[in-house]
Every structure is written in C-alpha cells, then in structure tokens.
Amino acid sequence: MISAKDLVSRIRTLPPLSGAVVRLLEMTKNEATTTEQLERVVNTDPSLTANLLRVANSAYYRGAYPVSAARPAIVRLGTRGVYEIAVGLSLRNTLPPQIPGYATDAASFIRHGVAVGVLSARLARDVQGIDPDEAFTMGLLHDIGKLVVGTFLATEAARAGDCLLDQNLSFEDMEREVLGTDHCEVGFEVARQWHLPEAVAIAARWHHTPTAAPDAAAQRIASVVHVADALAHLLGHGEDAGELRRRLDTTVPDQLGLREEQLESLAGSSLLAIQELSDALQTTVA
Amino acid sequence: MAPVLLMPLATLCRDSKRLTAKGGGSVDTVTKPAEAGTPAAPRPEYSITVSMADLQVCNDDVAVLAAYALGSCIGVAVWDPTNHVGGMMHVMLPSSQTGGSSGWARPAMFADTAVPLLVGRLVQLGCTPENLVAKIAGGGQLLAESKQLAIGSRNVTAVRAAFATLQIAVSGEDVGGTKSRSLKMHLGTGRVVVSSAGEETNL
C-alpha cells in the first residue's frame, strides 16, 4: 500500500506541462483567436515550431507544396491540430523511456494516448455536450496517473504478477489490490497539479468507471474516453501490461447511442491519423 | 483462370517497393545466391513488419514477416512450401462494407477483401492456391465482451469464411481470449511462431 503522502511527493516530482501549451488551450477555446496570435505563442517554443513543420509536411497533412514557416503550418493544421501536437509533444517530453510496473515504454504509451485522443475527438462529434477541442486532450492524457503509479508498482512487481495470474482480475483491480489506489485516482491529482482543464481531470478519474462519475456531464465525458480506451486497447494501439484484460462497461456504448458499425467505422477512419500523429511524436526534433 | 487473379491490385500495399529497398529478394526479381554459381555466405535473417491494415508478400528465404500487438486484429500467415514464398497481413475489421467507398478504406484492412488480395499476390509470385498453408492468430476480446465490441470474434469468423471461399484450409489457429499476440513467419522454413506475454508457441 502507498500512503497519500508518498503519492503527493511523487506527483510533485513530475515535470510540469509547458506554459505555451496551457496558453494554446485557452486560445483554442476562443473563437476570435487569429493565426497571428497563435503564431506568436508558437514562436516562443522553437521545438514546437520545428515539430509543427514536420507534421504539416507529413503524408497525412501534406498539401500541394511543402511549408517552411510557422504561419502556413498553422493554417494547414488548423487551431486544433496545432494544439494537439503541442500537448502531445509536452506529454512526450514528460515521459521516461520506460514506464516501470506497466511493462511498457514511451513509444507504446504515446501510441495508446494518441489513439484514445483521436478516437475521443471523433466520438465527440456524435455525442452531445462534449467540447471536441478538449476531447483529444482528455483521451491523450487519460492515463497520466500511470506515470506516478508505475514507479510504485515496479517495487511491488512480484505481488502484482501473482494478482495478474487470476484471469478474471482486471489491471485496475490489481492496482487497488496491491497499492490501495489506482492510476485513475492518481491521474486526477496529476491533472490538478498540472492545472489541466476540469474535463481532462474528470476523464483521468472516471475513464474506467464512467457510470460512477458525479453528474451527467462528467458521466458523458468519462463514457466517451471509456469507449475510446476500450477500442484502442482492443485494436492493439500500444502494448501494456494486462493486455486486453480490461472491463468494458457494456451499458456505456448503448447510453451514448453507439452501434457496432459506427465503432468499426470509427476504428478504420481514425487509423491513419493515429499512425501519423504518433509517428510524428515518436521522433521529435529537439 | 482463378478469380483471385482478377483482383484489382491498385492498393495501398507497399510490398514491392519496400522489399526492393531492403536489398533482399525483391518481389519482381528473384535473385538467390545459390544460382550465382559460387556458394555464397549465408545471409542473416531480417524482419519485415506488417503494420495494421497492411499486407506484405516476399520470396526471400531469409526474411521473417512479423505482425505485432494483434489484439482483436488478426495476423494471417500464408506460405507455399514448394517455393518458400509467403505473405502476411494484419487484418483490422471483418467487412469491407464498413468502409464502403470512404477515402480511408483500403482492401488490406478488411478480412473479406484482404484474404483474396493476399492470395492473388502470392499467385503473382508463382504460388499455386492448392499448395498454400494458412495460419492465423489474434481475434482477442476484452474481459466483458459486449455486442458492440465483438470485433475480435467477428474478425475470426470473417477470415475463416474468406479462406473457405477460396478453398484454402486454415491449418493452425491461436485465436480469442484476452491475450495480445504477435505473429512471425520464417520464410525459409515456413515456421510460424505466436508470442504472447513472453511465451512462444509454434503454430
């Protein structure tokens, strides 16, 4: 078991998200934001500029001609595209090469986060009451608690392994069994610490138990990420300990009004975006 | 002529370019060291990754085709023991009807279009359909499978049906359950290996 004090001190050691990202999120929520304003923020971060150019010139976004400056890259990617890359990069820069306790590495963690982000953003188009601009971030960052929990799990690895031998125990059950908390509770605290939007904290806290979220709006947010997470794991976007041993709340897709064909079509139509964006974030330009 | 030969090949399969670039046996030109007259040093094995919704065919003895993190997707390995030519695909969804004419849809993504496409490409490389040996792995599911997320079992059914249509037997399977698997095929021997949670099994 880990104490609340241990957790808080561990959360404090995580590097903060970049200031440019926090400002970009505020700007994307304001419809009056101009390309010039975005450009000014982007230009304060040379690494962000370099990576925006790379993504703007990638196969997924490629236009008739290559772009070589921030302004045309921003025009091509759109406000939301710029924000998605910015927040993805800052997550990438926060990750250690390996995430102990989850038998996963930075590449798999990013791939899974990007998949859940892209799928959540697409689902948000069909679900009332979700801000599509926040949906990507909700998905991308839903597992941030693992960055903290992983180091504690690694020291309890033997017990965790024993627990996982029980085929009907989900990975979150195992975390609670071994640590007395799970990556959802911890993720909520990390979201607070990073001053992330409320919706992102809600998604981190309730993505495994959406019907337990406190109100209808929070339940919708958590449900979208719950379905996106299940779909991403199912398809194999990013490997992780526990593999497919995740509980899907089978009432959730029905509550969101989602049908099998819609989910399969969503999986297929999101594939290229997931591949391009996670590849772009894997090999970032410093 | 077998209908598989009539499959449109204008697809997103990047096999011939990739194999030529690797310097191994290319799809279009077979160059084996033994045919050069002097015995050559054995070349080392190299791996070709088949990513999600893609397929690869190859006629190089030392190549290993691999599909990783299969989840509900299905890795399909097909091999001709008479000429050591084989192919692999990483099928994502059961039916091409899901994609319709959408820009994102590609034949290697769906079981019903991917299986005839793979067989057609192998025939182009000199394989005979009745010689082909097919093995499949994947089709996993979450702990509580709901009817909305039964993609894994629907994929298994669709891949089996597609091979049945072509009268090709599926001689090895490791499918279902909550496992995530990887699939490898060594083209020189036809050996097919499934790995899951660090354990390897010959299929």
Image (cartoon, coloured by chain):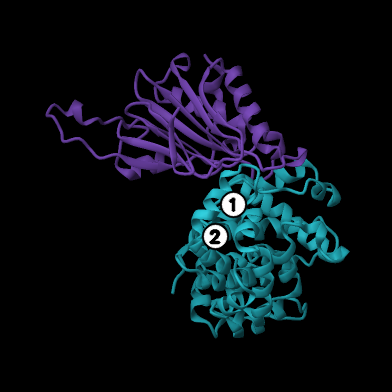
Q: x%, y% of residue B121? A: 47, 28
Secondary structure beneath label 1: helix
User: Chain A drawn in what color?
Assistant: cyan
> Mark 2 belongs to which amino acid?
Phe
Per the rendering, the mark at residue A109 is: 2
Look at the picture and state if A202 lies above or below A253. Answer: below
Q: Is residue A127 above or below residue B162?
A: below
What's the residue at 54%, 71% (across, down)? A89
Q: Can residue A35 be seen in this view?
A: no
x, y percentage for residue A138?
70, 66
Tag 2, which chain?
A
Q: Which residue lies furthest to the left in this view?
A: B38
Between residues A99 and A234, which one lies in front from this camera angle?
Answer: A99
Image quadrant in which you'd find residue A222: bottom right
Depth check, front residue: A87 or B114 = A87
Q: Are marks 1 and 2 on the same chain?
A: yes
In the depicted structure, whether residue B198 falls above or below residue A195: above
Query: Mark number for residue A272?
Result: 1
Decide: is B42 above or below A137.
above
Where the C terminus of chain A falls, by quadrant?
Answer: bottom left
Which quadrant of the rendered structure holds the N terminus of chain A?
Answer: bottom right
Within 10 Å of the Cα at label 1, are there few (<14), some (14-19), or many (20+) other Cα atoms?
some
Q: In this view, does B95 lie to the left or right of B17?
A: right
Chain at tag 1: A
Q: Is residue A20 visible?
A: yes
The x and y percentages for residue A220 are: 82, 60
- Residue at (65, 39) in percent of width and height: B141
Assign a secondary structure to mark 2: helix
